Image (cartoon, rainbow, N blue to C red):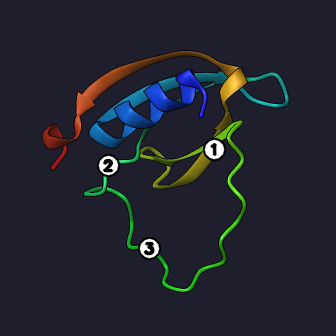
Amino acid sequence: MTKKRAILVEGLKKNVIKVTFTKVNGDERVMRCTLHDSILPEQTIGGIKKKENLDVLSVWDLDNNGWRSFRLDSVTDYQVVEGVEELI
């Protein structure tokens, strides 16, 4: 696991983070996201397991209420927006 990935995953499990990244088409995207258990939807039991791609991070997008992903090498900035406890 890369250092950037480890830092982001650790932060996302505890907080809401605003991630700025460049999409594949060149557009810049800013996304408020998290991986905190209290916010994530119920996991589907018996779902298909995909091989994890360490270059891509899947997160819960709070503004679109769904799973989104981004390439780690496309991240230009990230910062903690708020602790999850403030949302609950």
* Residue at 38%, 34% in the rendered image: 10
User: Mark 2 sits on what residue?
Assistant: 36
Give me the C-alpha separation between circle 1 and circle 2.
Answer: 16 Å
Rendering coords of residue 63 (x, y %): 44, 44
* Residue at 66%, 28% in the rendered image: 72
* Residue at 72%, 60% in the rendered image: 51
Q: Which of marks 3 and 1 is nearer the N terminus?
A: 3
User: Mark 1 sits on what residue?
Assistant: 69
Q: What residue type is labelled 2?
A: His
Q: Which amino acid does label 1 sit on?
A: Ser
Quarter location, residue 34: top left
Rendering coords of residue 46 (x, y %): 55, 86
In front: 64, or 13?
13
Relative side of 47 to 59, left or right: right
Rendering coords of residue 75 (x, y %): 63, 21
| Local SS, label 1 | strand
Q: Which of marks 2 and 3 is nearer the N terminus?
A: 2
